[in-house]
């Protein structure tokens, strides 16, 4: 048996220790090749499990199962209320096993178990319930043609078909819920590829999907690598739509792979989101809020507030405040209940983030706090505040995806110029504005070119809020009604009277 954190419950440890199988056509199976790959505990760097390594043949089996379930199976013809009931049931089952999922997320991704318990798992439960409600509320409209009385015409909203869904490792369970919920509500069938770094909660979710009673082939869950499994999935000719969350670089590959049969594509990609603090903001709230905006989830959020833009009048106060919080954050293994910041997800991510910090320092940034890795094993990086950063620096331009914030000062009171600075990025995922002036808040919200603007808050992920990016942050929206629309086609019907 492999080493597992002793704080993990027996039940969770039993699941981690079992022989893992993927979920294809309602059955739990090993890879066609028999190959597996290791799963690591990022707090220790130790291997804790092995999971099947899906390749093109497994992808093909899963896609054919999803295709058959869509074309011939009961799913698309099932009563919407029945689809809704199954989604609701999945939410209930997940809630019943909340503690186990919180532990799986913590062990596999590294995040504090306290956070997974309070955020990741309940948000996923909410998502399934919210989307269960949509299943019965999908309908077209009647239209008035230009020659009234001659035609009766209306639209039908139909599921797009087989959806390929490829997700990242930063919120393994929640990203699965964001993807599965709307697709299933709409009546699509799904092949979901989990991130290779964090497959455990998705495999456990597959068991609950089975237990809930989803018909065979409606949901298929694969574990495998990007090139080996993700690429053939995105390219498969029997897939109608691909939904991807991950890096902008891979997003471009997905678009190319999808071009063969012109799959519908939605993408949720990188970000370099500003948190903009005005002098009239509630300072305690702004300082705590902008610190959490970047350090939440070890900074591994696509919408992390990684550019801290502060008005010069309060620059020192805010940046010192954020640095003080950063220096006090308790770093440790996610399974320690007192941990506030866990390890980064993988050695690769650890190298990447520490590399960025070095690059920032080389380019002349000043480290106000943090700046180093920590711990004698595992992938721990200190929360880091960089000042004296210039717009052309790598650390300011590129997504770091770690607990590293670049503080920038603005002296302007002109909202157009502040917005121009905030928008000076190829990304457009999110922004937060910290002010007590309603007029400033709403005026600036309109000027920010990003899919989400939070005012006096950051990282609010309610199931109802559409989430996605402008510019190179992606195509389409997840969550909310718009997510359901992504999985529907519109059919116009005209009847000559
Ligand atoms: P990150 O850089 O955050 O790890 P990636 O964009 O590399 O994110 O990965 C996100 C997801 O995309 C993962 O499930 C990964 O396996 C998958 N992936 C990576 N490369 C490809 C590819 N060429 N085609 C399809 N999926 C891929």
Image: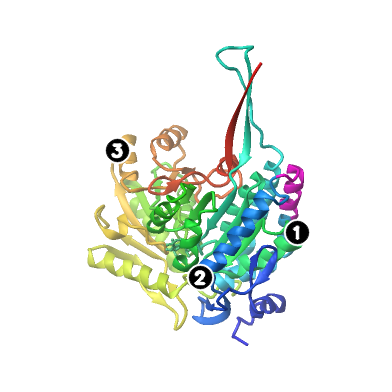
Q: Viewer-proximal residue, 190 or 395?
A: 190
* Crowd band around label 1 with a 10 angstrom C-alpha radius: few (<14), some (14–19), many (20+): some
Percent x, y of residue 321: 41, 58
Q: Is residue 222 visible?
A: yes
Q: Which residues are magenta?
A: 77-89
Which residue lies under the disc numbered 1?
Answer: 212
- The residue at label 3 has a CB less than 8 Å from ligand 1: no
For the point 22% across and 63% down, which residue is it? 364
| Depth check, front residue: 295 or 229 | 229
Q: How far apart are the alpha carbons under marks 3 and 1? A: 53 Å
| Residue 417, label in figure | 3
Of the two numbered discs 2 and 3 on the same chain, state the one appearing first in sequence: 2
Query: What secondary structure is marked by label 3?
Result: helix
Q: Is mark 2 within 8 Å of ligand 1?
A: yes
Q: Nearer the viewer, mark 1 or mark 2?
A: 1
Tell me the quarter of the picture where residue 64 sits. bottom right
Which residue has dot 2 on it? 197
Residue 9 percent coordinates (x, y): 69, 77
* Mark before the other along the chain sequence, 1 or 2: 2
Earlier residue among tags 3 and 1: 1
């Amino acid at each position: 048996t492999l080493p597992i954190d002793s704080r993990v419950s027996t039940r969770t440890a039993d699941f981690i220790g079992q022989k893992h199988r993927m979920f294809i056509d309602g059955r739990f199976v090993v890879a066609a090749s028999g190959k597996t790959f290791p799963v690591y505990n990022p707090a220790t760097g130790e291997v804790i499990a092995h999971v099947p390594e899906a390749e093109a043949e497994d992808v093909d089996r899963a896609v054919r199962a999803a295709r058959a379930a869509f074309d011939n199976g009961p799913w698309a013809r099932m009563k919407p209320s029945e689809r809704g009931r199954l989604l609701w049931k999945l939410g209930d089952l997940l809630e019943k096993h909340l503690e186990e999922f919180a532990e799986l997320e913590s062990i596999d991704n590294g995040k504090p178990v306290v956070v997974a318990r309070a955020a990741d798992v309940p948000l996923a439960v909410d998502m399934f319930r919210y989307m269960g409600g949509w299943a019965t509320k999908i309908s077209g409209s009647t239209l008035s043609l230009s020659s009234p009385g001659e035609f009766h015409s209306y639209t039908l909203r139909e599921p797009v078909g087989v959806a390929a869904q490829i997700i990242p490792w930063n919120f393994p369970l929640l990203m699965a819920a964001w993807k599965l919920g709307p697709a299933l509500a709409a009546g699509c069938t799904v092949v979901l590829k989990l991130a290779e770094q964090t497959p455990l909660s998705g495999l456990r979710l597959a068991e609950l999907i089975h237990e809930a009673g989803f018909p065979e082939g409606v949901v298929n869950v694969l574990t495998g690598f990007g090139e080996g499994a993700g690429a053939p999935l995105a390219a498969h000719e029997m897939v109608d739509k691909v939904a991807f969350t991950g890096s902008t670089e891979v997003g471009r590959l997905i678009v190319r792979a999808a071009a063969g049969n012109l799959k519908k594509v939605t993408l949720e990609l990188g970000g370099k989101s500003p948190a903009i603090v005005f002098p009239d903001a509630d300072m305690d709230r702004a300082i705590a809020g902008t610190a959490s905006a970047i350090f939440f989830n070890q900074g591994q959020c696509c919408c992390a507030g990684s550019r801290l833009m502060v008005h010069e009048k309060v620059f020192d106060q805010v940046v010192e405040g954020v640095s003080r919080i950063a220096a006090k954050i308790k770093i440790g293994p996610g399974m320690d209940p007192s941990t506030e910041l866990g390890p980064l997800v993988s050695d690769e991510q650890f190298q990447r983030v520490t590399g960025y910090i070095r690059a920032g320092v080389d380019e002349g940034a000043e480290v106000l706090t943090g700046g180093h890795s920590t711990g004698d094993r595992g992938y721990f990086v200190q929360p880091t505040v960089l000042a004296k950063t210039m717009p052309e620096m790598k650390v300011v331009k590129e997504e770091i995806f770690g607990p590293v914030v670049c503080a920038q000062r603005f002296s302007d009171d002109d909202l157009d110029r502040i917005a121009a600075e905030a928008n000076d990025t190829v990304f457009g995922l999110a922004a937060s504005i910290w002010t007590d002036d309603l007029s400033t808040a709403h005026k600036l919200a309109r000027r920010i070119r990003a899919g989400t603007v939070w005012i006096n808050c950051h990282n609010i992920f309610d199931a109802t809020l559409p989430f996605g990016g402008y510019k190179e942050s992606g195509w389409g929206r997840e969550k909310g009604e718009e997510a359901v629309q992504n999985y529907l086609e519109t059919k116009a019907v005209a009847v000559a009277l």
